[in-house]
Amino acid sequence: MKYIFTIHSPITYFCAANVVLTEKLQKENVVFLYTSFIPPDDLGLPVPSFYTLHKSVFKKLMTFNLVKAYDKYVNEITNGNRFQAYIDLAHYYQKILITHSNCTAFHFIEEGMSSYIPPQTLSDLTRIESSTSFRFKGDKEKLRAILRILRGYNLRLLALPYFANSFTFLNDSKYYGFSPAVYPGVLTENKVIIEAQTIHLSKKKITSEIELSNAILLIEESYFKVYKIDEKDLDYCMNQSMSILKNKIASRSVYVKLRPGQKEHNSIWIRYLIKNQLTYKVLSGDLILEELLIDSKGCNVVGTVSALLFYSSIFGHNAFSNYMLIPQKPKAVFDYLDFYWERVTNLSKLSDKIFN
């Protein structure tokens, strides 16, 4: 039996590695099917995803029947063996994977805040096709739908839901996460809560020797861009954040954690640290910060609505958010995540008593 984990980010790998160790899966049977983030090879075999290998127009034409070609690729990486799949969401490639004739079961692994936020609207439920409408509008949408069919997707495959929550009554599926709040709506008996504090991911350390204990960690995230926060509101939020943090930053080690693929010159935190003439060190976007947090003590982690704030609190650190400091922002699901705000403190309420 093989075990295939679809990996596309550091947190996906972090959870996958914990599942491998929790379930005591043998290295020779584990496959990490990765896209942008390349995992180490000490817990399983890293294999580039089908998508990664077939990005060019030529490769897409050579594998025009995508479903058939993907099935063949899965047979190659598993040597034709039966397998179980571990996915975060049922995107198109995951839909093909879990319906492969050799797939005996599939499970879900935590992937940041997306594993904690339930779909609340029809748009949420159909996020996989958010760029289209519920009725054909123009020839482009019709062509896209026809192309899906021509590339091997039939109606039954396309009908599979996207969110993990939709599969909750399948008896053979498990849901792995780090908090009981993960996968809202999923039956409690189907959840496997991982005690990550007790697990060291590998004998070969996959992170560099960085001492984070008692440091301040500033987390970069995509919130301001995704929710199109006005520049003046962003500026107000960051100036207020720096005003609150400035005296504390001056006496501590400060690290800025970039997003995967992000460059330093695009960092919001770095822009305001430079503006305030404060020193800092940079942590790569590909660094698995969660692993370092497990081995550190007394960190103060600051961001907006990143899952890293939530994880930091789970792992025993202080977590602070400047979300409430944004003057004008659209209503979002973050406003209603009570479990999140029970662990993450409003930065404007920061005091020496709760700051290590």
Image (tube, helix red, strand yellow):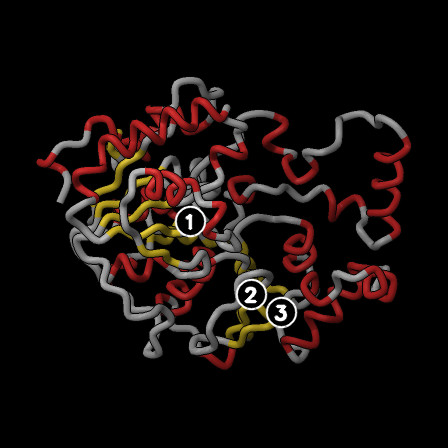
Mark 1: which secondary structure?
helix
- Residue pointed to by mark 3: 48
The residue located at (42%, 49%) in the rendering is 190
Left or right: 289, with 61 as reference point: left
Q: Which mark is residue 84?
A: 2
The residue located at (35%, 68%) in the rendering is 207
Q: Residues within 10 Å of mark 3 (few under 14, many from 20)?
A: some
Does 336 sit above or below residue 30? above
Q: Residues within 10 Å of mark 1 (few under 14, many from 20)?
A: some
Q: Residue 322, image x and y in percent? A: 32, 31
Q: Which mark is residue 99?
A: none
Question: Which one is in front in this view, the residue at disc 3 or the one at disc 1?
Answer: 3
The quarter of the picture where the N terminus appears is bottom right
Q: Residues within 10 Å of mark 2 (few under 14, many from 20)?
A: some
- Residue pointed to by mark 1: 190
Q: Is residue 172 visible?
A: no
Give residue 122's quadrant in the image. top right
Q: Residue 46, image x and y in percent? A: 54, 73
Q: Residue 16, image x and y in percent? A: 44, 62
The residue located at (87%, 35%) in the rendering is 140
The answer to whether the residue labelled 3 contacts the one labelled 1, judged by CB atoms less than 8 Å apart, is: no
Which amino acid type is shown beneath numbered disc 3? Pro
Does 251 sit above or below residue 303? below
